[in-house]
């Protein structure tokens, strides 16, 4: 029984050792590099395994670069891989730049890739410019008419400014600002409709690509639509606001007048109450004067006659001149 187990155990150990050896020594990849004329030592591949670098991510781009005639070594590719970069994309960008005769070094390409930009797309955009379409931009001319403008901006990547340069959003914002400024400085919206190329020339002359990762080649006005009459709407809103202010002030004055009237009514009622109170004291004063001998009976009768005469005159005055005697209205008719 032991004689059967021992050969099986030996086979398992040999198989495990072979798998471990092939894991640390990628013979197939080493043979492919030798066949492609790339000098990569077997111990270099083992060192990549120990440094937790996938050899296939280094050797295949190295073979690709060597076949394209680029001078790139293993240490450069491995360092970029360990820094978190995309080695294959960097090599593709170098090959594309080499074919298009665009000066691009490995250090510059690696820096662009580590900065988070797609270096291959940037090289392709340098060869084939990209068209950026702006959203609808609303601008108002001096006569108050709104214009809705769409523009197409043709840009080319500037490889020297890809690191630290602004992106597409900045280009769109600057172009939109230039369109608003140009339309806003126009006396009449018809001038803009007649010469839309004036917007392109004015905006393009402002150097909007300064500090960006792109070079603006052209700005073309794709569409212009006439919008609202903003000036008339503003005047209408101002008139409505003035009307509401005037109404509020009139309501304030009316409220003050009502309050004043209520105050005068209260004052009048108070005075009437005082008069009634004073009139109620008159009989008491007369009685007291009669008792004290300060007023005689004849004085009292004379005062009543004066009061009656005064009351009669007030009644005649209220009735008017038509009812006065001697005016001809009381004469008998024949």
Image: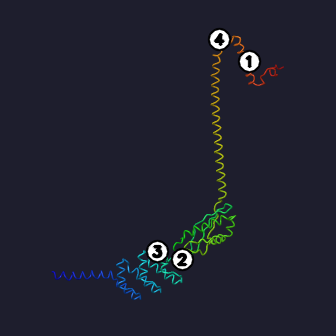
Q: Secondary structure at mark 1?
A: helix
Residue topped by disc 2: 160
Foreground: 306 or 291? Answer: 291
Say whether disc 3 or disc 2 marks the residue closer to the N-terminus.
3
Spatial separation of the CA atoms under disc 3 and disc 2: 15 Å
Marks 1 and 4: which is nearer the front? 4
Residue drawn where x is 40% and y is 87% of the image: 39
Spatial separation of the CA atoms under disc 1 and disc 2: 118 Å
Residue topped by disc 4: 292
Residue drawn where x is 62% and y is 69% of the image: 223
Q: Secondary structure at mark 2?
A: helix
Residue drawn where x is 54% and y is 77% of the image: 160
Say whether disc 4 or disc 2 marks the residue closer to the N-terminus.
2
Q: Secondary structure at mark 3?
A: helix
Residue topped by disc 3: 114
Spatial separation of the CA atoms under disc 1 and disc 4: 27 Å
Foreground: 210 or 223? Answer: 210
- Lateral position of residue 309 relative to residue 174, left or right: right
Say whether disc 3 or disc 1 marks the residue closer to the N-terminus.
3
Say whether disc 1 or disc 4 marks the residue closer to the N-terminus.
4
Circle 1 packing at 10 Å, graded few (<14), some (14-19), many (20+), is few
Spatial separation of the CA atoms under disc 4 and disc 2: 124 Å
Evaluate if marks 4 and 3 touch, with contact meaning CB atoms under 8 Å apart: no
């Amino acid at each position: 029984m032991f004689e059967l187990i021992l050969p099986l155990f030996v086979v398992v150990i040999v198989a495990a050792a072979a798998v471990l050896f092939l894991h640390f020594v990628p013979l197939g990849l080493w043979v492919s590099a030798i066949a492609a004329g790339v000098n990569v030592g077997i111990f270099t591949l083992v060192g990549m395994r120990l440094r937790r670098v996938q050899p296939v991510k280094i050797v295949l781009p190295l073979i690709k670069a060597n076949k394209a005639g680029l001078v790139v070594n293993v240490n450069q590719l491995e360092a970029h891989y360990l820094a978190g970069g995309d080695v294959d994309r960097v090599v593709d960008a170098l090959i594309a730049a080499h074919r298009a005769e665009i000066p691009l070094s490995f250090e510059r390409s690696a820096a662009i890739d580590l900065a988070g930009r797609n270096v291959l797309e940037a090289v392709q955009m340098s060869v084939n410019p990209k068209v950026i379409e702006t959203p609808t931009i609303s601008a108002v001319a001096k006569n108050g008419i709104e214009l809705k403008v769409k523009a197409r901006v043709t840009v080319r990547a500037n490889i020297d400014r890809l690191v630290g340069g602004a992106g597409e959003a900045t280009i769109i914002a600057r172009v939109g600002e230039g369109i608003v400024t140009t339309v806003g400085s126009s006396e009449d919206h018809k001038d803009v409709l007649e010469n839309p190329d004036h917007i392109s020339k004015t905006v393009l002359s402002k150097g909007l690509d300064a500090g960006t990762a792109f070079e603006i080649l052209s700005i073309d006005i794709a569409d212009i639509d006439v919008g609202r009459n903003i000036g008339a709407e503003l005047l209408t809103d101002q008139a409505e606001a003035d009307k509401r202010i005037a109404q509020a002030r009139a309501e304030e004055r009316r409220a003050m007048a009502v309050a004043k009237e209520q105050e005068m009514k209260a004052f009048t009622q108070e005075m009437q109450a005082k008069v009634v109170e004073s009139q109620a004291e008159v009989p008491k004063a007369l009685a007291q004067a009669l008792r004290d001998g300060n007023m005689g009976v004849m004085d009292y009768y004379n005062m009543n006659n004066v009061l009656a005469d005064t009351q009669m005159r007030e009644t005649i005055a209220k009735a008017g001149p038509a009812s006065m005697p001697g005016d001809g209205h009381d004469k008998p008719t024949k």
